[in-house]
Amino acid sequence: MDILSQLWSLLGLLTVLQNILPAQLLSLLHSLIESLQDLISQYSYFDIPEFNGYCGVDINDLYRHVNLYLNSVNSSATASTCRRFSLSRSRSSNCISFTIAPNHTIHDSFNGHSLCWTHQVDTVQDSLEEKRSFTLKLPKRHRHMLLSPYLQHVTSRAEEFERVSRERRLFTNNGNASYESGWVSVPFRHPSTFETLALEPQLKRQIMEDLKAFSSGREYYHRVGRAWKRGYLLYGPPGSGKSSLIAAMANYLCYDVYDLELTKVTDNSDLRALLIQTSNRSIIVIEDIDCSLDLTADRMLKATTATATRRKRSSSSGYNKDPGSGNYQLLEESGRVTLSGLLNFTDGLWSCCGEERIIVFTTNHRDKVDPALVRCGRMDVHVSLGPCGMHAFKALAMNYLGIEEHSLFDVVESCIRSGGALTPAQIGEILLRNRGSNADLAMTEVVSAMQTRILSSGGTEHLNTSIEYEDTVTLTRSPQSVLTVGSSPENWDSSPGKISGKKRKAKFLVRLRSLTKSGSGRRGV
C-alpha cells in the first residue's frame, strides 16, 4: 500500500508540474529524456512515415516497400512473433494482403542480426485522419553496416513480391493513341503454363532459361550499353501453339501483355505514343506480322518507281531512311504505319523509353516477313513451332486424358515419323472431344486422323498444297520445334537435315508400309 501511495503521489506531482511549467520547458525536458534513453539504449530507431514532407502529400515509396516486404515474410517463422495482423484484398491483386496491426511488432533477421518492425498508427488531433509509419529497430553498434544493405534487401524482395502477386492485365489498343491512354485492358487469366505446354523438353528448357536470364539481367544490359528488351519471332503453321506459348511466357515472368493491332494505328506518331504508354515488365505482341500491314510496300515502292523518285526529289515533302537497308526511299503515302516506323518501334531510340520489355512477332510464314524486321537486335530469338513430336504428344495425352503410357503410343510415334504429325490444336480437339470416353477410343481416333493425314498427303493434290509449309517444318527437323538464337534471314534455308520433296515422296510408301504393319500388329495384340 505504501508503494502504491508513493506512485500516486508521484503521478500527481507530474500532473501539477505539467500544468505549471511552460510548454517550451516541458519540450526541452522531453528531448533531454529521449537523448538520455538513446545514449543508454543498445538499439537505434528509424522512422519511415507513410508520406514524405511535413504536409504529407507525396507517398513514401519506402513505406510501401516495407509493407510489401512484411507481406512476403508473413508465412515465415519471423511472422510468428506478431500476435495480430490486418487482412485486406485489393482489386489489383490476386492474393490477401497482411499488414501488421497498429502498434504491434514483428521480428526479422538479416546477416545474423535481429531486427524489429513496429507499425505506428497515431490519430491526428481534431481530425479523423491517421498518421502511419514503420519504425525499424536494429543494433546500434552495427547500424552503419546493416542499414543500407538491409533496406536494399527489403526493396528488392518487395518489388519481386509485388510483381508476382499483382493481377496481370491484357491490353489492346483502342485507336485513340493521342489521348491520355490508347489502351484498354481486362484481367489476364490465361491458364497456359510451361508445365501444360505441348513442346519438346529441350525447346521448353531453352526458352525458360532464356527468359530467366533476361528478367534478371538488369545490371548486365546496363553494363554492355543495350536497351533492356528482347525480341521473339514465333513462326509455324496455324494451331502450332504460338498464342499459348506467349501466355505461358507471361505467366512464367508475371508480365502484362499488350496485344498491338496495327490496323487500328493511324500513323507512326500514334505507334510511338502507344509504346510510351506501355509499362515495364510487359510483353508487346504483334500477331500475324506478315498479314497485319503491307509493310514491304515501302521497299517495293523504290524499286518500281525509281524514275519517279528522281523526278520528284526536288518537290517531295521528304524522304524516309529504312534503318534495315540503309537506303532512302520516297514515302508517297502519308498517315499510315510504315516499315521504318515499325523498325524504330522495335529497335529505335523510342524503344528505350522503358525497361524489361519483350516484343513478340508471330507469323505463319517466316519467309514473307521483311528481313529487316527479324534480324538480330530486333528479333533475337527465333522459335519454330511445328506439329507435335512424340514428347509433345505425350504431354497432351497427360493433360487431356491423364495417361502416361498407352499401347498405341508406338503407333503414334510411327505415324509421326511417317509424316502424319498433327498440330497441338488438332490433337487437343480430338482429345477434348473424347474426354468423357475411354482413353482407348481417344487414342484410336488420333491414330486414325494421323493415318488419314498420311494417305491424304500422298494421294490428293489439294491437300499437298495445304500442308506444304507444314511438311517443310515437320519432316526436316527433329524434334518438331526448334529454337534459334541470333538467326539471320540469309541462314534460314541452311537448316541441317533438310530432305527434298522428291526424296520424301520416294520414301513415303516405305514409311506407310511400315506403319501399316506396325498398326495391324498392335491391333492384333
Image: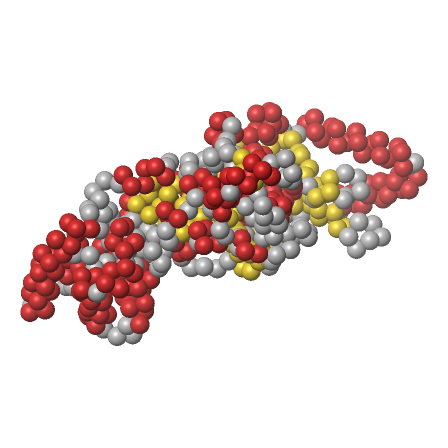
Residue drawn at x 9%, y 56% as measured from the top left: 510
Give whichever of 445, 253 is nearer the camera. 445
Give whichever of 23, 305 is nearer the camera. 305
Question: Left or right: 97 with respect to 427?
Answer: right
Quarter of the figure with the C terminus:
bottom left
Question: Left or right: 215 with respect to 117?
Answer: left
The part of the image, by quadrant, that contains residue 22 is top right
Residue drawn at x 70%, y 29% as measured from the top left: 38
Colour approach in the figure: secondary structure
The part of the image, by quadrant, that contains residue 187 is bottom right
* Residue 216 in sight: no
Q: Position of residue 207 (x, y in %)?
A: 36, 44
Question: Left or right: 120 with respect to 13?
Answer: left
Give whichever of 225, 239 is nearer the camera. 239
Residue drawn at x 70%, y 44% as measured from the top left: 59
Q: Is residue 416 above or below residue 383?
A: below
Question: Left or right: 430 with respect to 42?
Answer: left
